[in-house]
Image (cartoon, rainbow, N blue to C red):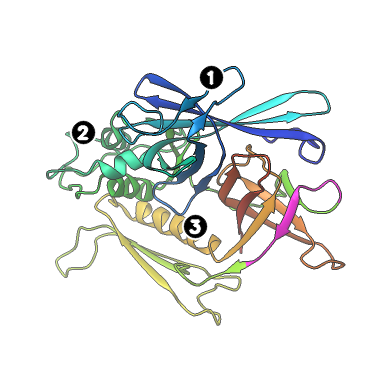
Amino acid sequence: MSLPEGLLTGAYTYSARVDSWLGSQWLGQVPVAGGSVSWTVGQQVQGTLSLTVPRYGAASEAENARDFTPDHPEAPLACFGQELQVTVTVTSLVDGSEYTEPAGRFIIISSETDTDTVTVSAKSLLHRTEENRLVSLTVPRTGGTLASEIRRLIGTQMGVVIDEALTDRACPSSMSWGESRIDAVYEIADAWPARLREGRDGVLYLLPPADEITTAPVRVLTDGVDGTVIGVKRSWTREQVYNRVVARGQDTDDAGRPTFQAVASQTSGPLSVTGPYGIVTRFWSSPLVTSQAIAARSAQTMLASSIRRATTIPVELAPDPSLQLDEPVRLYSHDVIGAAPVELWGRVAAVELPLLYTGAARVDVAIDT
């Protein structure tokens, strides 16, 4: 849900609250001297936090000042499993209404001190799955399904919510997972196929693949009068932009050919396989591909995701904590002063939110090509 219309174009205040937790123990609120929260769809661990904290200070006027040097295992900024919960509040100076949004939950990776400050780096909770590698050959449980296996791989490290629109199915008992637990989680998502997204509430969500945008998005990012956009740039790349995807199962016939294989090709637009772009192919295989239909769905989903990466528009704008990954947006801006406005549709591929009111937010919009 977006913020009320006009809030960010009028008078408002913007603030972030950071709370430190060690398991179920609250270690207190942490004062914020700077930093940002970032969420990106192109990373396995999708969220990062950079935070600067005064070495000696108070989180609010109601608290006494304290030393935030991480000098013992239960210090709020130590690296012994401490998690930082971040929330952002936007307050209207017109009517005093407040709008609070979660910005994420992060495990502290490193803390460094200098004379006056503590600098903290943290990652979202899927980093625990990345660190917790499998130490022995792991096969699906008897009767295991995609849903039950992804819950088993994640374990108690974070909550898992699976959208009801995803149809569960059995995992082949003959397969096994490699050492990387997080790779196994993403393999399940790719083979389903499903979008795997970390929520800002610390929960892992598996969602249906994003549809093509066919109607004008409700959310509009615009500059000029009553707009919140500060600057718009353009970014193009060929790197990892495939216009043909081959998805295969790992079973083979007597001739050594994959039993199930599907090819998805871009046949229209500037990235067409028949155009001057050429053919850039990605091969992907998994034992979870157990039918021709599964291979076809996985190939088509990966192709759509790849094509969307070709054109990305980084947008600087007033900090809006309600913007979410994958959200469809309509970008309406003037690339050059005096030029006619340009309207483009796309989905949010990355969000960076400042922790102080003096900073601007950044949103990367992946344009539907």
The picture places residue 242, in percent across and down from the top left corner, at 45, 68
Looking at numbered disc 1 in the image, what kind of residue is underneath it? Asn
Q: Which mark is residue 305?
A: 3
Q: As displayed, is residue 162 above or below residue 225?
A: above
Find the magenta span and give its range. 225-234
Measure the C-alpha gap from mark 2 to mark 1. 56 Å
The residue depicted at 32 percent of the width and 50 percent of the height is: 187
Q: Name the residue under label 2.
A: 143
Q: Helix or strand or loop: what does disc 3 sit on?
A: helix
- Please report whichever mark, 3 or 2, sits nearer to the chain's N-terminal start: 2
| Outermost residue toward the front in this view | 115
The residue depicted at 38 percent of the width and 67 percent of the height is: 282
Predominant SS of the magenta segment: loop
Looking at numbered disc 2 in the image, what kind of residue is underneath it? Gly
Q: Helix or strand or loop: what does disc 1 sit on?
A: loop
- Please report whichever mark, 3 or 1, sits nearer to the chain's N-terminal start: 1
Where residue 218 sits, quadrant-wise, is: top right
Measure the C-alpha gap from mark 3 to mark 2. 31 Å
Q: Which mark is residue 64?
A: 1
Where does the N terminus fall, quadrant-wise? top right
Check residue 230 for magenta coloring.
yes
Where residue 320 sits, quadrant-wise, is: top right
Tag 3: Cα neighbours inside 10 Å, few (<14), some, or many (≥20)?
Answer: some
Where does the C terminus fall, quadrant-wise? bottom right
- Please report whichever mark, 2 or 1, sits nearer to the chain's N-terminal start: 1
Looking at numbered disc 3 in the image, what kind of residue is underneath it? Ser
Q: As displayed, is residue 238 above or below residue 346?
A: below
Q: Is residue 70 shown left or right of residue 36?
A: left
Tag 2: Cα neighbours inside 10 Å, few (<14), some, or many (≥20)?
Answer: few
